[in-house]
């Protein structure tokens, strides 16, 4: 289990993390989402021992991450700015990783050659961004880590390679119980792979739940009323309302079954509950004018 407890970090008077607390369960695929500047990359750099917190704790199975080589050997990281030695090839970086990670598997490294069509002796700096990201996955997954931390992991990969990489990651989760923490702005993609979600804003983790719990707790209703829009039950916690013609769409906080039962008193012509996407959940959980889409006259 990977944990952050009340982590505070300030840069030049700016509080990037303001008591951030999160828990990534063992064997989970945990998606960390939030707007730009929310603190996602900062908390990831704390969880992987790159930054030292001003206060708070970063733990892996109860052991502190900071200045703890034994813990760090159990983790592997692919950041948005993945580092490699400037003159190194994939083969040379593989020897470096092999010396750093006791779990590095030469057998897996050789098998990965069939997955990633790269020249292992070509300098990585001469590769495209997408090829460099493939090299990062090739090397990192050969380390056989217990915990894999990814920051915008598939940025720059083509659709086929993205699917291939996610397939490899999920196979590791299923076969080896690998814990995966992934931060990405591609919420549609995260929805397909994550079983836990944390939403972050302004240096705090606002909530973290399983994806199924999030989807069960917020409902999109499409309703057609027989005449004028009636007064809706006061107990409904309506987050958003819009309409196109006679079709009214409501975003309502609560369980689908209970909301549908209460809406029956309006005698609707049509009443349908539709599951929300992770993108919609993110928008309505954030709420407020700061995240509204504005009409701008140019």
Image (tube, rainbow, N blue to C red):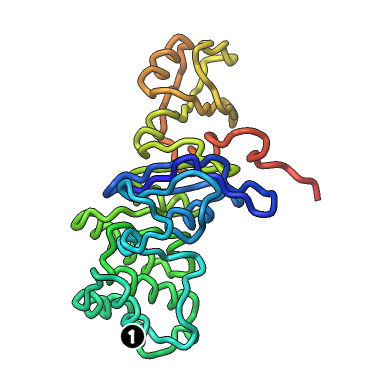
In this picture, residue 61 sits left or right of residue 224: left
Outermost right residue: 298
Residue 132 sits in which quadrant?
bottom left
- Dot 1 falls on a residue whose secondary structure is helix
Image coordinates for residue 77, horizontal then vertical, percent: 40, 64
Image coordinates for residue 293, horizontal then vertical, percent: 66, 42
Q: Residue at x 44, y 88 (%)?
A: 123
In this picture, residue 176 sits left or right of residue 232: left
Whether residue 282 is visible, yes or no, is no
Image coordinates for residue 83, horizontal then vertical, percent: 47, 74
Outermost front residue: 67
Residue that mark 1 sits on:
91
Q: Residues within 10 Å of mark 1 (few under 14, many from 20)?
A: some
Q: Residue at x 67, y 35 (%)?
A: 289
- Of residues 3 and 94, the one drawn nearer to the viewer in this rendering: 3
Query: How many numbered badges does the structure rendering display?
Result: 1
Residue 133 sits in which quadrant?
bottom left
Whether residue 123 is visible, yes or no, is yes
- Of residues 173 and 114, the one drawn nearer to the viewer in this rendering: 173
- Of residues 256 and 193, the one drawn nearer to the viewer in this rendering: 193
Q: Residue at x 30, y 48 (%)?
A: 61
Is residue 115 placed above or below 47 in the rendered structure? below
- Of residues 120 and 217, the one drawn nearer to the viewer in this rendering: 120
Image coordinates for residue 47, horizontal then vertical, percent: 43, 53
Q: Residue at x 38, y 65 (%)?
A: 162
Is residue 124 placed above or below 225 in the rendered structure? below
């Amino acid at each position: 289990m990977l944990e952050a407890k009340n982590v505070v970090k300030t840069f030049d008077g700016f509080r990037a993390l303001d008591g951030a607390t999160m828990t990534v369960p063992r064997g989970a695929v945990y998606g960390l989402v939030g707007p730009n500047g929310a603190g996602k990359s900062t908390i990831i750099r704390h969880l992987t021992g790159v930054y030292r917190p001003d206060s708070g704790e970063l733990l892996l199975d109860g052991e502190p991450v900071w200045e703890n080589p034994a813990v760090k050997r159990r983790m592997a990281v692919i950041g948005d700015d993945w580092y490699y030695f400037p003159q190194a090839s994939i083969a040379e970086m593989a020897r470096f990783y092999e010396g750093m990670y006791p779990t590095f598997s030469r057998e897996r490294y050789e098998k990965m050659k069939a997955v990633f069509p790269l020249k292992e002796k070509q300098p990585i700096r001469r590769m495209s961004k997408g090829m460099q990201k493939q090299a990062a996955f090739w090397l990192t997954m050969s380390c056989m880590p217990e915990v894999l931390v990814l920051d915008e992991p598939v940025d720059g990969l083509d659709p086929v390679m993205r699917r291939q990489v996610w397939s490899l990651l999920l196979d590791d989760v299923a076969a080896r119980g690998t814990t995966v923490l992934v931060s990405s702005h591609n919420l549609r993609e995260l929805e397909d792979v994550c079983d836990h979600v944390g939403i972050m804003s302004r240096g705090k983790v606002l909530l973290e739940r399983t994806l199924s719990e999030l989807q069960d707790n917020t409902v999109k209703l499409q309703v057609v009323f027989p005449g004028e829009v009636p007064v809706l039950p006061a107990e409904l916690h309506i987050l958003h309302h819009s309409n196109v013609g006679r079709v009214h769409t409501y975003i309502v906080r609560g369980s689908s079954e209970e909301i549908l039962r209460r809406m029956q008193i309006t005698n609707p012509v049509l009443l349908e509950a539709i599951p929300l996407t992770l993108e919609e959940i993110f928008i309505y959980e954030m709420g407020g004018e700061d995240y509204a889409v504005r009409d701008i006259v140019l």
